[in-house]
Amino acid sequence: MYVRVRRLLTASLGTLLLFGPTPAAQAAPPDPATHEAAVGSPRGPSDTDLPFGVGPAQRGRSADAPGRQPSQPEPSAKLAGKPRNDVIKDVPAELTDASIAYNLIPYHDIPPALRALQGSDRISVEVIGQSVLGRDLHLVVATAPMSDAQWKNWQQLSDLRFSDPHAAQAKLAAGGYDNWRTPLFINNNIHGNEWEGTDASLQVLQELAFSTDPAVVDMLNKHVVAFVVTNNPDGRVAATRANANGFDMNRDFITASQPEVRAVRAQLVRYSPLTMLDIHGYVSCTLIEPTTGPHGDNYEYDLYIRHALRNALAMERAVLATGETRASCANPDGSRRNDIPFRDRTQGWDDWPPIFTPMYSMYHGTIGHTIEIPLNPRGNLTVAERHERTRINTAVAVASIKGNLGYATEHRSELLANQLEWFRRGVDGESTRPIDDPLAISLARGDNVKTHLQDFARAYVIPAGTDQRSATSAARLVQFMLDNDLQVHRAWRPVKLGGTHYEAGSYVVDMRQAKRGLASALLEVGRDVTNDFNAMYDISAWSHGHLWGATVQRVGTDGTLDDKGLRLVTEARATGAVAPGKQANYGLAVDSVAGIQAVNRLLGDGVRVSRTADGTFVVPGDVSVVRPIAEEYGVEFVRLTPPQVRDATPVSKTRLGVAANGGEIFALRQMGFDPVSVTHTAFNNGTLSFADFDAFFVSTTAFNPLSLDATRSAAFHQWLADGGTVVGRGASGKQFNDRAGLLDVTIAAGRSDANGIVSVVNDPASPITGNALPTAFVDAPQYFTRIGDGVRVDQRLAAEGFFRAGHWGGQDAAAGHAVVVSGVAKGANVTLFGTEPLFRAHPEGLYPQVAAALWR
């Protein structure tokens, strides 16, 4: 095994650019058979340990209370940036690892490769978390050795960047940062079947670890370079883009629902790197960001683009210098180039949403880039061609990394000054500025030079008391902000902010902070960019402040803050409560993910639960039952009077079948349901029986009632008649409804690429949406244009100005139409959603609508 690893790591590094025109001299690494694997420091805590189980038995299971995910432990209270050197253990060989067929390193060969690198005092290797299936995630940090005293100084200067950017700027001008090592970051293999970044990083690390070239030594004295070896080991082994939960993790960074994403997020928070690469594939001509427009309006884009564009050009030169013509494309004059979307495309490859890894990193003052290596090795290829493509791709990734490191070394002080100015604008509350860089203006294609200028709010308040619709969701939101390195205060007494009085206990996000762009991205609703560009790469709207269930109020740009009544918080946790005294019954209002989980936990434990007409759950007055639930989930059990519970109807544990996408299945598990995937084939062959299910959630065509054989079709219709529950979502859910002959409604579709946040009007008497948020999320939106007899309109789009943020051409046609409907058909309780209440596990504040529909 070791021979194979050494051959992979010492594959030709060519004449690539960072370390000079000739290959660097190599010092032989120690023999791993005799080298002690690592310093015996214990594996430190990770914010990926708590929210998710690992191993096949817990695949995809969420935490008991994801609404109360614990804060990321401080990596090391005194020296957060100083890397550990963990003991890296071998894992069993998997001969079915998909990497092997591509002549790339399999996951089981990574640990010995990392131990070999640990033979250098320039290298530290940490285990920063685990994947869904329990595989370790490795962070390799390369820098010249430093003493604890040097690391202490490094940490102080690192923290000063965002705690006091004015002081940091003064220190930089006085030479105080001359010897400070700037952090850089490379992320690999977030899409499991885009492999080569891992192999390229191991090649570069081999050189960083053992080269005696003075240029390498000098570079390591100027930087702390962090590499995530593989962000998606489960996908790497299985050749899947998604992780084992079925998530495209490069769409998850603003939500951080996945353990692998939270592990990398913690490192971006830890280092706030100056540059960041995220290596992907595959496009026919190597692609190097920056992107087309529209550009995210919470970035300091004028600061970003001046270095992002020049770094991209440096990486392009490095890639072209490899001589791999298949990795580039031809200009009309016969010269070669790569694809830099800002320069070469007019639309369709934008950085608007912070769901992508590099875009998220930009909120930490980072010059972030996606790199798309060129040649797809998958598909029907000869072995020789497949291996040739991965060889070229690996060479391109090596060149990109080295080009980036070279640029960061040459422009180290300028990059740091750029980041400090980014943070200074935040603490001073300045508006964003237009792009003024002459090179960017001259090279921008189409409207790519245009930006939305942002006047940030003075603050946001997450009120306490009667002004807060969900204390549990509020604590969840605040903890999420803390985990993302944002500052949040809490009022220790009643305060007046922006002319409004708030109760003690209210949370306040002062926008005069270094990373205010991220706070705005989380809490603002966004904007309608429909008329900016005709095509967007992915979603155009997201909002924790408007979709996560908590009440969030904006304090205008000219508002004032009562600083004396506010204190910084380091942790937010909904503690839960139980009404005092002996009670016959307790009531629980479900207004959060944790509330849904609490109900499902009670049902799973066999507790007798019922529900009133207004949606309140009734639990018998046994304090020994409700108090542990209140404490664990952070929910409140209130006193109920006998008249309030008189007409409550029993609720039982829902045996749930699903024909849904991976994100929806994950969200249902997150809520405490135990979904089982169903298909008409599985019913027909006897693998599944309708008697085993109480409800179906349908959003795909995997379960077609018209494809059931005669016996199973009769069983299905009997199941409906016996009071089964059907919840359909989107076009496929409506199709299932029609095929089963259920609700009499007609649906219309918006553009398939439309998505956004909408204002809605809820029926206050609806058991599904009576207490719902006034906003919802749509993707490929569906709305109902005709409502038949016996069908309730639970939720409709507002009649005027309903589209709050996103991209939806032709949106006016949907105004005022229903988007959630329900009724009884053929004996079954049926609900149809035209909205996307579980989209990528993001709009948590919409989850209670789905739970209410399933519990009927």
Image (spheres, rainbow, N blue to C red):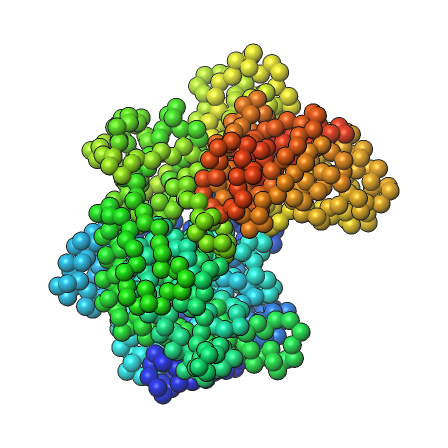
Q: Nearer the viewer, residue 828 or 573?
A: 828
State the residue at coordinates (54%, 18%): 585
Q: Position of residue 368 (x, y in %)?
A: 38, 62
Label count reads 0
- As drawn, is 267 to the left or to the right of 650? left
In the picture, measured across the screen, residue 28 lies left or right of residue 670, that is left
Rendered image quadrant of residue 522 = top left
Q: Position of residue 23 (x, y in %)?
A: 38, 86
Q: Quadrant of the N terminus?
A: bottom right
Q: Quadrant of the C terminus?
A: top right
Choose top left, top right, bottom left or bottom right for residue 142. bottom left
Residue closest to the eye, 826 or 209? 826
Q: Let me know if residue 789 appears in the view.
A: yes
Q: Left or right? Give the position of 795 relative to 759.
A: right
Position of residue 354 measured from the top left corner of the image (x, y, whole percent): 42, 53
- Asked if residue 851 can be seen in this view, the reply is no
Q: Is residue 817 above or below residue 63?
A: above
Q: Is residue 406 above or below residue 257?
A: below
Q: Residue furthest left?
A: 174
Q: Residue at x 42, y 85 (%)?
A: 14
- Vertical relation: 646 (above or below) 595: above
Return the x and y of residue 489 as percentages of the image width and height.
29, 38
> At x 36% / y 88%, what residue is drawn?
22
- Horizontal side of 837 relative to 458 (left or right) equals right
Q: In this view, which residue lies farthest toward the right?
A: 710
